[in-house]
Amino acid sequence: MPNLDDLPANLQAVIRETLRQVDALSAKMEAGDITVDQWRDQMEAIIEAQTESSLEAGAGETVGAADLLERLIQVQLDFLAVFAADIVANHWLPAYRSRAQMYAESVKVSYYNGEIIKQVGRVLPLPAMPAEGTICLTRCGCSWEIETVNAANRDYDAYWRRGKTDSCATCIEREKQWSPVRIRGGELRR
């Protein structure tokens, strides 16, 4: 199980619940109790439910960001399709349990989107979230610091903050390039 100690308690709870569900499903696959199609269908349901739960946990309330939620879920479902194809090609391998557990940590991306909504009251067009597109993948410990320049005009400065001294090369570069990124009129300016 990944180390969750540095994460907010409500995110830890979502990840732990997701891990519980994913591990139970992995055990069924290892035992041969379900087919790959059944595994994939159940994984899709877990991903959908837990992505929404983590977005709401980050925001501290129910969020009506359907487009954002759909996009976040679709990213994981695309990875899941590749994973399912690997299982079909190789059968269930012992290393697949660990790979499946990464979906539990992938909820960090939706959680951090929720945190942004909580901070500024809206979705911001940031170039990426922690754990999204990084070499460290779901092990990312970074975050965004948002400064409101003019809320009425939807103007913000956002700073990528590394949360670990062992950050990956992607995160080190993001700190250099994205401190700050500017959002003006609700649009990302490069």
Image (tube, rainbow, N blue to C red):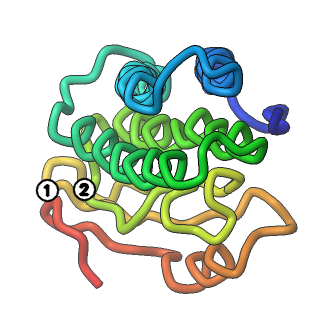
Report the residue at 25% width, 56% height from top: 150
Kind of residue at disc 1:
Asn
Q: Position of residue 163 (x, y in %)?
A: 74, 57
Q: Position of residue 43 (x, y in %)?
A: 45, 27
> Image check: 60 left or right of 134?
left
Classify the position of the N terminus by image quarter. Answer: top right
State how far apart marks 1 and 2 are (Cα). Answer: 5 Å
Residue 66's place in the image compared with 145, above or below, is above
Q: Position of residue 10 (x, y in %)?
A: 62, 19
Residue 123's place in the image compared with 18, above or below, is below
> Image check: 67 left or right of 2?
left
> In the rendered image, which residue does mark 1 sit on?
153
Query: Mark 1 near mark 2, Cβ–Cβ under 8 Å?
Result: yes
> In the rendered image, which residue does mark 2 sit on?
150
**Secondary-structure class at tag 1:** loop
Kind of residue at disc 2:
Asn
Q: Quadrant of residue 183?
A: bottom left
Report the residue at 47% width, 56% height from top: 129
